[in-house]
Image: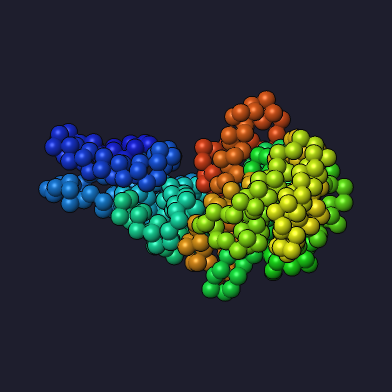
Amino acid sequence: MIQYFNRSFSIFKINDGKEVIKIAESVSQIQIGLDSFLGAKFQRIPIRDFTDINISCFEGKRLEDYYFTRFPIKKSIVNPRCPLCGSRRIAPFESQYRTVRRFLGIVEDVEIARHLCKKCHEPFSAAYEDAPPQGHFHYEVIWAAVDLATRLTESLRHAETFLNDHLKAGVSHTDIHYWVQKSGASLEELRTKLVPPFSGYLGIDEFHLTLQGGKIYVLGYSDAKTHAFLDFDIVEGKDTQSYSESITHFLAQHPLQDQIKAVITDDFPTFTSIIPNLFPNCPHQLCIFHGKGNINKRIYAAAQVSFKKALPPAYQDLKAVINELFEAATPTHAKYWLYAARSVQIRHGLENNKGITKLLQKLETDLEQLTHFIEDPDCPGTNNGIEQIWSLIRPRKEIMKSFNSKKSIKNYFNLLQTAINFKIYKNWCLTHPIEAETLPFKITVDYWFQYINFSPKKNHQPEKSKSQKKH
């Protein structure tokens, strides 16, 4: 008798000790490769137990000849209740047969019974929950492929090579592409539910991709304190109209207008022109990190010195005084350091330097937006939350080259948003157990990819019978 074990890759157990040693050695090598590449998370992909596998194929042959080959597992799936009307008045109709591939060359031969409901006169098939409808791969293979496609920074062909060389899954990159698209579409409603309570600080930033069809611009929204990925939108360009329509659509989908305490963006001109109009009652905080970076660029440009070289003493003094703006204790104190920067400019004879003059004029205009975090100590002062999200997504441009339409990119972003939010939401629930009990959505799985559903429930109304149509 051959026994299939759960949650491990120890596949066979036979009385012959030599065969056990050989298989154990090969399996341990595979397991080491998985640990180094996927980590411990992959080992917990749920695999069900199966027993009573036919051993007649081994008679007279060595076990090594059949390792990583087909081992059929016969399963019969029945469903005595009609899924459309719930009636138990059913009659046998016919049977369907499917072959479902699993890891290590294991194949399930599944017999799915079909029935005819005597009440609604509709035929139906029994549900097989271990694989998608009409699919030939087990969910464990699909979950692993989609998880690789979201965590790898290589192409889909690299995921195909890994699954086939190490796990003998028998998949192709087109299969993975299809699974990514279907998975992303199925997570459309879930991706925004895995979000902790909104802190009140909204971070907005844009992200662009250069693909075969041209540039694609993505506007992202995040919680500036919890770094949760609230939503994203693919816009036509970086113009005022596109950004305004996207933000208006976001506020319509997420009723957070009354909860927003501040909006945090960089100093991109489009943001500075539309944010005061779209959020008239909320202060606009410019990102401190971007503000300091732009100040350094302007000072180096005014000094006509490259970043690899040291600044002249006059510009170093000016830079040190300007940076004190972000260390001030009150807004009045911040204005004092701005006046001090003007005195440094005069003292070092930089009045005629147009770059320094424009920099100080811009700081005077944006001083209130740059230093709002002083009045509100809870304000993070930076939109690093959305910047960290872009830093996770940016290395996956190689995978995104396989998607040539905005719809495909959106489905892939659905996967990435779900994966990012799942980790953040799970950690928040662990650190805030009391508040987590009051939330409407609770995590019911161990890993985000277990939420993938290729067969969503549809409100199907059965057709009326001929006798019902007459009446």
Q: Residue at x 65, y 62 (%)?
A: 302
Q: Residue at x 49, y 53 (%)?
A: 150
Across and down, in percent, residue 263 comes to 76, 48
Q: Residue at x 17, y 51 (%)?
A: 65
Of the 4 image quadrants, the one containing the C terminus is bottom right
Q: Report if residue 87 is visible in the image.
A: no
* Viewer-side residue, 416 vs 464: 416
Left or right placement of residue 394 versus residue 378 in this view: left
Q: Give the image quarter of residue 444.
A: top right
Measured along the vertical axis of the image, is residue 23 above or below residue 293?
A: above
Q: Report if residue 28 is visible in the image.
A: yes
Q: Give the image quarter of residue 433.
A: top right
Numbered-mark total: 0
Q: Residue at x 57, y 61 (%)?
A: 305
Left or right placement of residue 147 versus residue 201 in this view: left
Across and down, in percent, residue 415 comes to 56, 53
Applied colour scheme: rainbow
Measured along the vertical axis of the image, is residue 353 above or below residue 44?
A: below
Across and down, in percent, residue 164 comes to 33, 56
Across and down, in percent, residue 153 comes to 45, 56
* Viewer-side residue, 188 vs 207: 207
* Viewer-side residue, 246 vs 328: 328
Q: Give the image quarter of residue 43.
A: top left
Left or right placement of residue 188 versus residue 167 in this view: right
